[in-house]
Amino acid sequence: MIIANPDQNPAFATLMRFYAAETVYLAPGGGDFSVIAETLDADCVLHQPASLPYGGEWRGPEGFRAWMEAFGRVWSHLEVRDPQFFPSGPDVILSRSHVFATARATGKLIDWPLLQFFRIRNDRIAELRPFHWDTATMLPAIGDAK
């Protein structure tokens, strides 16, 4: 379900371009990060919970690429289901979804609700802050992944 119209909300259109680029990048044979970098502000920042192996602040497109690599070392499969998008003014989109992921270290499949905050600047993602429902439940599945 989508609760936004890209024709009426430029921030939502930017977010959809980001997701389309991410899909291309993650597809077999699609590993050219430039498709994602083009959707990110030069000074973008991704905030991840410090308790996770890929926690911290990841800055700029290269930081985002490094985070994707770190994230990929932890999870072997990830599926996002039932995304909903809520604009909050001209430059903010909130999303709500449910994540299903398989941990590389243990092979365990876990799931959790996810809320995300996106700030858009100049038609690019400037800030991304995911709110995982309960990172403590993720840690046993992750094992000692680094």
Image: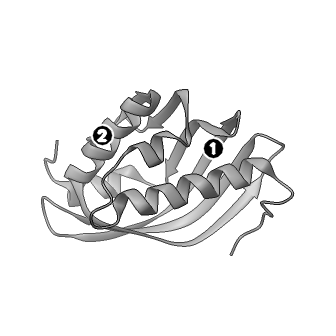
- Residue 46, above or below 87: above
- Residue 9, above or below 109: above
Colour setup of the view: one colour
- Residue 15, above or below 58: below
Q: Amino acid at mark 2?
A: Tyr
The answer to whether 67 appears left or right of 141 in the picture is: right
Corner quadrant of residue 125: top right
Residue position for label 1: 118
Q: Is residue 121 visible?
A: yes
Relative image position of residue 143 (x, y in whole percent) = 15, 53
Question: Which residue is depicted at the point 49% across and 55% down?
Answer: 21
Relative image position of residue 16 (x, y in whole percent) = 63, 58
Asked whether 72 or 130 is in front, the reply is 72
Specify which label sits upstream in the sequence, 1 or 2. Answer: 2
Q: Amino acid at mark 1?
A: Phe
The answer to whether 108 appears left or right of 95 in the picture is: left
Asked whether 91 or 29 is in front, the reply is 29
Q: Which mark is residue 53?
A: none
The answer to whether 41 appears left or right of 1 in the picture is: left
What kind of element bears circle 1? strand
Question: Which residue is depicted at the point 61% across and 61% down?
Answer: 96
Residue position for label 2: 54
- Nearer to us of marks 1 and 2 is 1
**Count of marks placed on residues:** 2
Relative image position of residue 131 (x, y in whole percent) = 52, 48
Question: Which residue is depicted at the point 63% across and 39% down?
Answer: 124
Relative image position of residue 31 (x, y in whole percent) = 30, 54
Corner quadrant of residue 105: bottom left
The N terminus: image quadrant: bottom right
The answer to whether 102 appears left or right of 94 in the picture is: left
Is mark 1 in CB contact (under 8 Å) with mark 2? Answer: no
